[in-house]
Image (spheres, grey):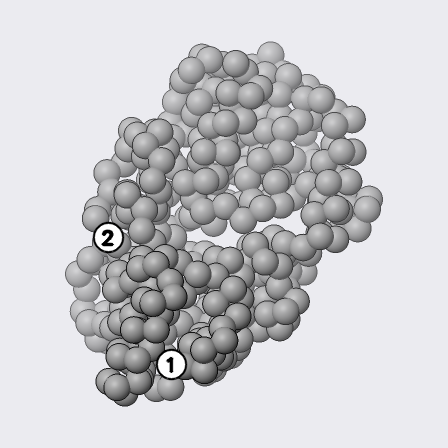
Amino acid sequence: MSSEHPVLVIGAGISGATMANLIATKLDRKVLVIDRKDHIAGNCYDYRDDNGIMIHKYGSHIFHTSNDDVWRFLRQFTGFNTYMHKVIALIDGIETTIPFNFNTIRDVFPGELADRLESKLLEKFQYNRKIPIMEFGNQDDPDLKFLADYVYEKVFLHYTTKQWGTSPEGVDGAVTARVPVYLSRDDRYFQDTYQGIPLEGYTTMIERMLDHPNIEVSLNTEASSLNLDDYEHVFHCGAIDEHMDYRFGALPYRSVYFEFEEYDMEHYLPNAVVNYPCNYDFTRVHEYKYYLNDQSPRTVIAKEYSEFFEPGRNERYYPIPGRENTELYDRYLEASRERSNIHFLGRLGDYRYYDMDKAVLRAMDLFEEVFE
């Protein structure tokens, strides 16, 4: 097998598919791509159901980037629509947009109070600035202190506790920094230059990335079934602690699960995603037909619940940032260097949260590092 497939990629998600395509096209080398799942595309996997609706099996995936190289690379394999993601949250019974911005202030507060808060915010902060929620809490002015406490409780506190299984004080700053107060009227969740959903879905996009004479894909295949020493290079997108038989202990992850429901109606939600910070035990609800404007008399939603990862019971989704976890990962990474042919990448291999564009960029950078 080593003569036919001198390079092995473990994981057929967006990280592994990017690496495999670069090796096959730029180096004209044979690549074997394996995945333990029964499908390609990893957690980006989507499919059309019996209603003709494109379902994101593992939760909503919205592509966004400001990186021209990443955008050009992916455009080889798919067109994108111009969908720009917005998120609605139910706050005090009012459906309003988040991140919390000037429009949200107008939705949830009386006009006079909203005027006063907006005026004070513009006196203190630059317009169009994103302020991490924990930084925003450090206010001296009584009105702004009220606003900071309100946003913390109504938007951040309960949602964070549900999502991460701990209070916000127990969550690493790398996570809280992604939850801003946005001093703008821009209701979009992302402000990147390029945004959209692949016109034929993520699975088709990744299928085309892997559709090359130099690439062979083997699904339902465990890395442990192969001798990794047979390969000149192994690019491992799986969990580094599992790869090393948990010799230093398990790296913790948060997982999520989805309850899918179908309804005989055009739409169940007013928007593709609605967050429920203070209500229910699920964090948010997804309605998939919004992404590609699928036409069907029925609709499909998914209620998303967060839980801790347990091997053999659920999937790893989110690495849990923190000093101790980073130190544990670094021990594994150092020990992995005993085998110089193995390179880790992706959310699990790097134990780092990546948006899809950052996962592609990481694979592109690692390719340059190893081969050029």
Question: Residue 179, percent across and down?
Answer: 46, 62
Quarter holding the N terminus?
Answer: top right
Q: Which residue is mark 1?
A: 91
> In the image, what residue occupies the spot 41% across and 40% down?
357
**C-alpha gap between disc 1 and disc 2:** 25 Å
Does residue 248 sit above or below 142 in this rendering? above
Q: Residues within 10 Å of mark 1 (few under 14, many from 20)?
A: many
> In the image, what residue occupies the spot 59% across and 70% down?
168
Question: Residue 112, percent across and down?
Answer: 26, 86
The amino acid sitting under disc 2 is: Tyr
- Mark 1 vs mark 2, foreground winner is 1
Does residue 167 sit above or below 191 in this rendering? below
Q: Residues within 10 Å of mark 2 (few under 14, many from 20)?
A: some
> In the image, what residue occupies the spot 38% across and 81% down?
91
Does residue 124 sit above or below 242 in this rendering? below
Residue 83 tag number: 2
In the image: residue 254, left or right of residue 360: right
Res. 357 in view? yes
